[in-house]
Image: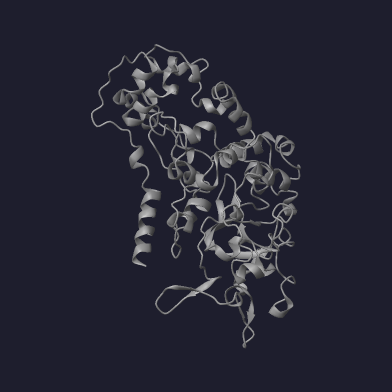
């Protein structure tokens, strides 16, 4: 137990203490080049401080990951430290700055240098900036889930009654598109967000003084964006949870399971992230599990793997875009319901569900008082929380010594059992109609378990 606690604490420090190693601030900044050049200006820390433009308030709210850390404008663009030395020795460091950024070279005038065809973030137009050297990757990535967020866009357009993406998204009003960009697109990444920059959700700016990082860092990139529903679970941040077994036993980073081909995409548009054929599956590593124990033998085609092996995980809901934010604040929860995507994830009758963000009036600040086709999809979605452990309250119990012990049968931890007094054990694990708010009930009619559980559970 003591060993596990130490692991837990060290992981939390690792998760939240990443900014120190990326601090390229000089202790005694001494410019060595003329300011009449990009490098000369951006290596002169005091000059950057003197000429910087303070940030304006950022519209759109904090978003799913909470408040974005603030990094000063001059720190975001300073070139210094070991990262800058690495950049200078890299092939990218041999390319003139204006080749990617445009603007006017050989001037000390900030306004003039950043005029004309200057582009602050070249990878926002990756086909030009990155595609000249990496055409295959750019062609694959431009329609990827990471860059476009198609699944999220699709839910907006379907609920608005405009049909599937991309046509449905193109049909949104300009006001809705503006709202989406301000509020929902903050985490969807360009090439630079993963390989050169610190993601916007992490404060933005240069990551390691313009060093090009081939493999994104799990903490500084992946879980900076995938915070509340990824890193929070994987690192066991929430009270009463422990880090995912893939971290504690194997030391896996995100890229051990989510390889670059999946992240970059295959050039196709997928309106639902689980449709991506390169997405990892448990069975990719855990082969022959069908008969490895009695639980698997009985339930391999009944429950998704996460139903038994997930701990409690983050949920929230009823997000008011551009307004009050999540009106159902983040909470730890756990719900089993009917598989909401059987055509995409066949083989499971029941699946783990996570409460999603949208409500009928989510977009009222952007011209739609109520989404006309809101009930087209459930408010609880198919979930694969990254908080896997072998023994959970569904698969075992803590003995008198506080050690987890597996059940000898799966009835105790997961089946609904009627008590002598008429109450029910384990009923809280399942999504019933009574668990839904009134406005959620029509959307969830196909995934609630009312009338669909085994008759001998006596709960229907």
Residue 108 lies, in percent from the top left, at 36, 14
> Which is more toward the observer, 385 or 45?
385
Q: Judge left or right: residue 32 versus residue 282.
A: left
Residue 11, x across and y down, in percent? 39, 54
**Image color mode:** one colour
Q: Give the answer, above or below, for where 345 lies relative to 301.
A: above
Q: Looking at this rendering, what residue extends furthest in the top direction?
A: 106
Quadrant position of the N terminus in the picture? bottom left
Q: Indicate the position of residue 175 as horizontal and vertical percent values.
A: 65, 36
> Within the image, what quadrant is residue 379 found in?
bottom right
Can I make out residue 102 in this image?
no
Is 312 located above or below residue 99 in the figure? below
The image quadrant that residue 157 belongs to is top right
Residue at the spot 41% in from the left edge and 28% down from the top edge: 210
Residue situated furthest left in the rendering: 28
Give the image location of residue 164, x and y in percent.
Answer: 74, 42
In the picture provided, is 448 more to the left or to the right than 331? right
Residue 286 vertical placement versus 166 (above, below): below
In which quadrant is the C terminus drawn?
Answer: bottom right
Residue closer to the observer: 308 or 208: 308
Q: Is residue 191 above or below residue 236?
A: above
């Amino acid at each position: 137990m003591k060993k596990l606690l130490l692991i837990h604490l060290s992981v939390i420090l690792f998760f939240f203490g990443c900014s120190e190693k990326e601090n390229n601030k000089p202790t005694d900044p001494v410019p060595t080049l003329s300011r009449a050049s990009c490098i000369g200006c951006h290596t002169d820390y005091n000059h950057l401080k003197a000429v910087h433009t303070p940030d304006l308030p950022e519209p759109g709210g904090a978003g799913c990951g909470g408040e974005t850390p603030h990094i000063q404008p001059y720190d975001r663009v300073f070139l210094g430290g070991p990262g800058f030395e690495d950049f200078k020795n890299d092939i990218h460091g041999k390319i003139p700055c204006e080749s990617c950024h445009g603007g006017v070279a050989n001037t000390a005038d900030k306004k003039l240098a950043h005029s004309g065809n200057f582009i602050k973030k070249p990878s926002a137009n990756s086909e030009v900036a990155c595609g000249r050297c990496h055409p295959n990757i750019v062609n694959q990535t431009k329609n990827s889930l990471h860059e476009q967020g198609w699944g999220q866009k699709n839910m907006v357009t379907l609920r608005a009654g405009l049909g599937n993406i991309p046509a449905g998204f193109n049909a949104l009003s300009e006001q809705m598109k503006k709202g989406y960009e301000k509020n929902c697109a903050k985490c969807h990444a360009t090439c630079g967000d993963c390989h050169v920059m610190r993601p916007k959700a992490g404060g933005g700016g240069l990551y390691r003084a313009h060093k090009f990082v081939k493999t994104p860092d799990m903490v500084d990139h992946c879980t900076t964006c995938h915070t509340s529903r990824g890193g929070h679970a994987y690192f066991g941040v929430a009270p009463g949870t422990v880090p995912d077994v893939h971290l504690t036993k194997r030391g896996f980073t995100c890229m051990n399971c989510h390889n670059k081909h999946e992240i970059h995409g295959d050039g196709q548009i997928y309106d639902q992230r689980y449709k991506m054929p390169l997405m990892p599956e448990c069975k990719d590593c855990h082969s022959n599990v069908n008969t490895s124990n009695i639980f698997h033998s009985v339930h391999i085609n009944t429950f998704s793997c996460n139903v038994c092996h997930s701990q409690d995980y983050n949920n929230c809901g009823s997000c008011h875009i551009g307004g009050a934010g999540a009106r159902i604040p983040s909470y730890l929860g756990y719900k089993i319901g009917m598989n909401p995507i059987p055509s995409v994830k066949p083989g499971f009758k029941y699946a783990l569900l996570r409460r999603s963000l949208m409500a009928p009036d989510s977009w009222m600040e952007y011209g739609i008082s109520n989404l006309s086709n809101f009930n087209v999809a459930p408010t609880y979605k198919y979930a694969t929380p990254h908080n896997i452990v072998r023994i959970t309250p569904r698969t075992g119990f803590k003995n008198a010594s506080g050690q987890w012990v597996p059940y000898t049968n799966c009835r105790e931890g997961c089946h609904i059992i009627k008590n002598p007094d008429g109450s029910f054990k384990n009923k809280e694990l399942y999504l019933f109609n009574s668990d839904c708010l009134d406005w959620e009930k029509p959307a969830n009619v196909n995934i609630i378990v009312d009338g669909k559980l085994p008759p001998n559970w006596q709960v229907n």
